[in-house]
Image (cartoon, rainbow, N blue to C red):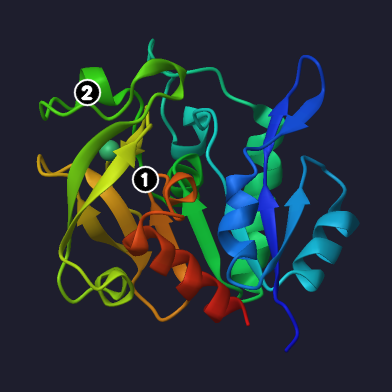
Amino acid sequence: MKRPLIGVTCRYNEENEEISLIPTYMNSVAVHGAVPILLYCTEDESLLRSWVDLCDGLMISGGPDVDPSYYGEERHEKCGPACPSRDRTESRLFEMFREAGKPILGICRGAQLVNALLGGTLYQDVPSQYNDGLVHSIPNLVPAWHSMNIVPGTRLHKILGVEECTVNSFHHQAVLKVAPGMRVAANAPGGLIEAIESTDDSWLFCIQWHPERTFQDDEVSNKLFCAFVDACR
Ligand code: MN
């Protein structure tokens, strides 16, 4: 059987011009038979087009805060520094993969970017703007953990097969207003949105936790990657 190709976006340090990505993003789909391909920041439309034609699906990975201009807001004093070239590249990739009808998985920043691109808004700084008594991020990528409720009847519920699980949490921002065409698929116990999914039958899931760091030991997280690779086949 032909292995599906999945484009995975990555970090870009504009100062020293280096790209980077924790390889578990790649491994999480490779273990299910996909061939992950790293998509770096570029403005080259013909290269972007070739990636979209070549790849069967897109994973938008985690990273820095999205520039608030993408959802029509002024920068909050606690919004982190943006990466303009990454915002541009991933926006274009999202539009093109969406237009091509190919599966898309947004993780953390990827989820926030997709919600902004589709017309939703974000909490620019969860700790000061949404006080639910939970810790959603600890500095230096130390994982916080909290439970998560999956909305019964959603497609995410069908994939994960549980109504509650525990997830890691590394996010500084989160979905505030859900974009048109998307719906809430999971919440933290205090109500903060942890996952959204498309309301039509396109394969578009956007999640706030980091299953790429736990899929080896966490059957629930692993199911999402399994479903993603299946959809890309
Ligand atoms: Mn969280």
Is residue 230 placed above or below 189 in the rendered structure? Answer: below
Nearer to me, 84 or 149: 149
Count of marks overlaid on the render? 2
| Residue 78: mark | none
Quadrant for the C terminus in the image:
bottom right
| Residue 54 visible, this orientation | yes
Give the residue drawn at x 24%, y 20%.
127
Left or right, residue 55 beside residue 152: right
Residue highlighted by disc 2: 129
Marked residue nearer the N-terminal end (1 or 2): 2
Q: Residues within 10 Å of mark 1 (few under 14, many from 20)?
A: many
Give the residue drawn at x 87%, y 48%.
44
On the image, the x and y values in percent for residue 209 come to 36, 45
Give the residue drawn at x 44%, y 34%.
72
On the image, the x and y values in percent for residue 198 come to 38, 68
Which quadrant of the view contains residue 162? bottom left
Quadrant for the N terminus in the image:
bottom right
Left or right, residue 161 beside residue 12: left
* Amino acid type at image mark 1: Gln
* Amino acid type at image mark 2: Gln
**Secondary structure under the numbered disc 2 in the rendered image:** helix
Is residue 65 placed above or below 95 in the rendered structure? Answer: above
On the image, the x and y values in percent for residue 225 come to 49, 65
Give the residue drawn at x 49%, y 53%.
106
| Residue 208: mark | 1
